[in-house]
Image (spheres, rainbow, N blue to C red):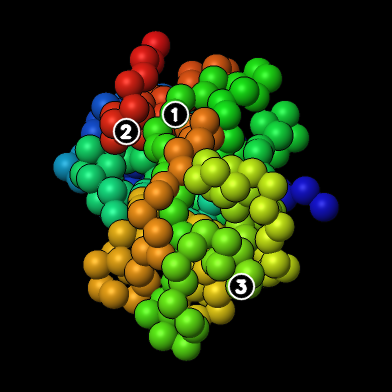
Amino acid sequence: MGRKLPPLNSLRAFEAAARHLSFTKAADELCVTQAAVSHQVKSLEDYLDKALFVRSPRNLQLTEYGLGLLPVLVESFDNVADVIKDLRLEESRGMVKVRLAPSFSAKWLSPKLMNFWHQYPEVSLSMYHGNNAVDFAREDIDIAITYGRGYWPGVDAYPIMTLDYFPVASPEFLAKQPPIASYEEMAQYYLLHDVDHDTWLAWYNHVGFPNIPLKSGYIFDDTNVVIQAAIDGQGFALCSSQFVADHLESGRLVKVFEESLETDYAYYVCCPQSHLKRPGVREFRDWMIAQSEIPSQTE
């Protein structure tokens, strides 16, 4: 059943006149004539069959019916105004939905967020964690931080962080093993893998052992879990300095060998061109690129 309400213009006219106790001030606020306000208020009174004002030559006073109606309308119009403001803010600038890997979020982005909020206090970030590339045509995501080679059809991609990989382990784990003197010896232990075996295979190829057999290990789909497993003494992990620098400094992890592997993969900030029409998305994209030491150009 539809709501039976008086015309909105009459409610607005009464609410403004009742707040100001003046038809003239209400007319100024609503950008109409005093006569128009008076007419709308009279229309509302006729609709309700109740007098809302006590009119006199010198002033305007609310009746008990007017006193009862005013706070309800003030709260209702305030609520509507707040919702409309939020909707407009979300559409134009305010809410930016970001997909990114948990490890990148924790180690790279989180320490920098306060700087972004100081520069763009009107932009809110809603972050969704995941490791897969975003299908912007199907997913409600504005911008993504994606690990790969930078080739995603229909998407602008700018590199913001490269990684170097080297083997690490916890001191407690190493203390329980015979000294690891060679790459071949390390391959006989449990290796901790991030998503698949490819990075370990690439590292061994880089140090001159392209066909070395690797012992079965544990595969995780989150770099943070790989790092924690290494800290907990579960085996050797291949990690990047960008993600384990604090653990190396604290001594929770140590480098097993100094040789590091640099790949042609990187973290990219990605979004379709059409998304950049929204100021908030464009500002966050440009800010992310500005944080990078990798040269890049923006429009």
Whether tag 1 and tag 2 are in contact, CB under 8 A, the answer is yes
Which residue bears the numbered disc 2?
Answer: 292
N-terminal of the pair, mark 2 or mark 3, is 3
- Residue sitting at x 36%, y 34%: 288
Q: Classify residue 196 as left or right of residue 46.
A: right
Q: Give the CA distance from mark 2 to mark 3.
A: 36 Å
The quadrant in which residue 244 appears is bottom left
Residue type highlighted by circle 3? Tyr
Residue 289 position in % (x across, y down): 35, 29
Camera sees residue 9: no
Residue closer to the observer: 282 or 239: 239
Question: Which numbered disc covers residue 159?
Answer: 1
Q: Residue furthest bottom?
A: 176
Q: Is residue 30 above or below residue 245?
A: above
Q: Is residue 73 above or below residue 20?
A: below
Q: Badge 1: how crowded within 10 Å, few (<14), some, or many (20+)? A: many
Q: Badge 3: how crowded within 10 Å, few (<14), some, or many (20+)? A: some
Q: Give the CA distance from mark 3 to mark 1.
A: 34 Å
Q: Badge 2: how crowded within 10 Å, few (<14), some, or many (20+)? A: some
- Helix, strand or loop at disc 3? loop
Residue 102 position in % (x across, y down): 51, 57
- Residue sitting at x 50%, y 45%: 207
- Helix, strand or loop at disc 1? strand
